[in-house]
Image (spheres, helix red, strand yellow):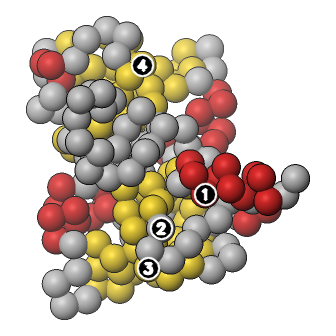
Amino acid sequence: MFTGIIEALGVVKDLRNDKGNLYITVSSTIASELKIDQSIAHNGVCLTVVELGEGNHTVTAIEETLNKTNIGDLKVGDLINLERCMQINGRLDGHIVQGHVDQTAVCTNLNVLDGSWEYTFEYNPSFGNVTVEKGSICVNGISLTVVNSKANSFSVAIIPYTFEHTNLKQVTKGNTVNLEFDIIGKYVARLMTR
């Protein structure tokens, strides 16, 4: 379980395909604190550390992950949001995040405001996922508050700290992001369809 509070920005150092799997090597400031078999969220995708190196770690993304997330779009040099799983005695600063991406969305608009940024994302509503204004959404692993909610889109407002310390600073119109919808909202939506 995660909180959506990004712990570090990693840099993709190597990408290797093997039998339908993608091995991703990421350098970061937290690499020396990681261990083999540890769960780390990468752009909101929970992946297992399979190898450690000097200042870096490697994880494996299987075909299912590559089909449902933006992980397969990564290129060497890309920034990637990293978060280790939460400790049971820690504060839940963001919201409950599982590290299971529900679907991707496309950035359809980016407004640079006076001291902040507003991003609009559009997603396929046929999956049954919903947002609510002032509710939580996880975008590329970042716990954010929904500003405007529509049937197939939503917007979020980004403060300077979040902009500087996450890979949102590299997201532009047309880019794909990972979405994990609020777990409570997903359960309520499922119950309402029964």
Residue 19, quarter of the rendered image: top right
Question: Which x, y percent locates residue 3?
Answer: 34, 44
Check disc 4 and report the residue beneath it.
Answer: 48
Q: Is residue 42 above or below residue 161?
A: above
**Residue extending farthest right:** 194
Which residue does the numbered mark 3 point to in the structure image? 147
Tell which circle, 3 or 2, labels the residue nearer the N-terminal end: 2
Query: What amino acid is at disc 4?
Result: Thr
Does dot 1 land on a helix, a strand or a loop?
helix
Q: Is residue 37 visible?
A: yes
CA neighbours of label 4 inside 10 A, class few (<14), some (14 to 19), many (20+): some
Query: Where is residue 123 drawn, in percent x and y?
Result: 64, 66
Structural distance between the alpha carbons of marks 4 and 2: 29 Å
Q: Is there CB contact under 8 Å for labels 1 and 3? A: no
**Mark 3, secondary structure of its residue:** strand
Residue 104, can we see it? no
Residue labelled with disc 2: 135
Quarter the N terminus occupies? top left
From the viewer's perspective, tell me whether residue 152 is left or right of residue 85: right
Residue topped by disc 1: 185
How much space separates mark 3 and mark 4, taking CA atoms? 33 Å
Secondary element type, mark 2: loop
The answer to whether the residue labelled 4 contacts the one labelled 1, judged by CB atoms less than 8 Å apart, is no
Amino acid on which the number 2 mark rests in the picture: Gly
Q: What's the distance in space between the residues labelled 3 and 2, CA to CA?
A: 8 Å
Labels 4 and 2: the sequence-earlier one? 4
Q: Nearer the viewer, mark 4 or mark 1?
A: 1
Q: Tell me which label, 3 or 4, sits earlier in the chain.
A: 4
Q: First in sequence: mark 2 or mark 1?
A: 2
- Residue 139, picture quadrant: bottom left
| Three-letter code for the amino acid on which mark 1 is drawn | Gly
Instruction: Please report contact status of discs 2 and 1: CB closer than 8 Å, yes or no.
Output: yes
